[in-house]
Image: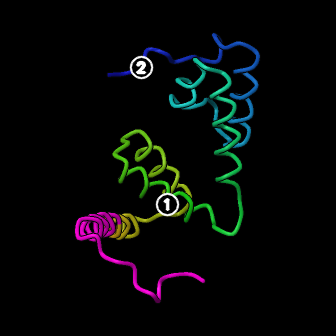
Amino acid sequence: MTSRHLTDYEHADAQVRAVYDDIKQTRQVDDVNNFWKCLAAHPATLERTWQSIKQTMAPGALDALTKELIYVAVSVTNNCPYCIASHTAAARRAGMTDEMFGELQAVIGMANETNRLANGYRVPLDEAFKQP
């Protein structure tokens, strides 16, 4: 079911417009995507989520492409079509190639399979993997 709660800029209050303006400036885009327009139904959630994602995805020890690839992997695992599409597009803008996307999908599939096997068999943790 599609949300009916999309708040366009012209219908947003001042608090929502301020967040939208920050998103547009930070991401260098003309408009915010539907994720943000949905969250605008609850301005506090919109602002909190934007501040958190802006901080998390900012330059740091991991480069932008690595962060987007991780986001795609988690989105695939969590079965979120919107986030898969959004972060795949962002990963492509950050330099992801078709070959990289194929390898990423292979790693995601393998990690999910082996995670389920390890959980199902309740494999005990090796001593070498335990941290002091």
Secondary structure under badge 1? helix
Would you place residue 120 above or below residue 16 in this image? Answer: below
Q: Quadrant of the C terminus?
A: bottom right
Q: Residues within 10 Å of mark 1 (few under 14, many from 20)?
A: some
Q: Amino acid at mark 2?
A: Ser
Q: Quadrant of the N terminus?
A: top left
Point 49% across, 54% down: residue? 71
Report, in whole angstroms, how far the alpha carbon at label 2 lies from the one at label 1: 26 Å
Q: Earlier in the sequence, mark 2 or mark 1?
A: 2
Q: Which residues are magenta?
A: 108-132
Q: Position of residue 79 (x, y in %)?
A: 34, 45
List the residue tagged with mark 1.
70
Residue 50 falls within the magenta-colored stretch: no
Q: How is the image coloured?
A: rainbow
Q: Amino acid at mark 1?
A: Ile
Q: Are marks 2 and 1 in contact (CB under 8 Å)?
A: no
Taking 110 as reference, is 64 left or right? right
Please identify the dominant SS of the magenta region: helix
List the residue tagged with mark 2.
3
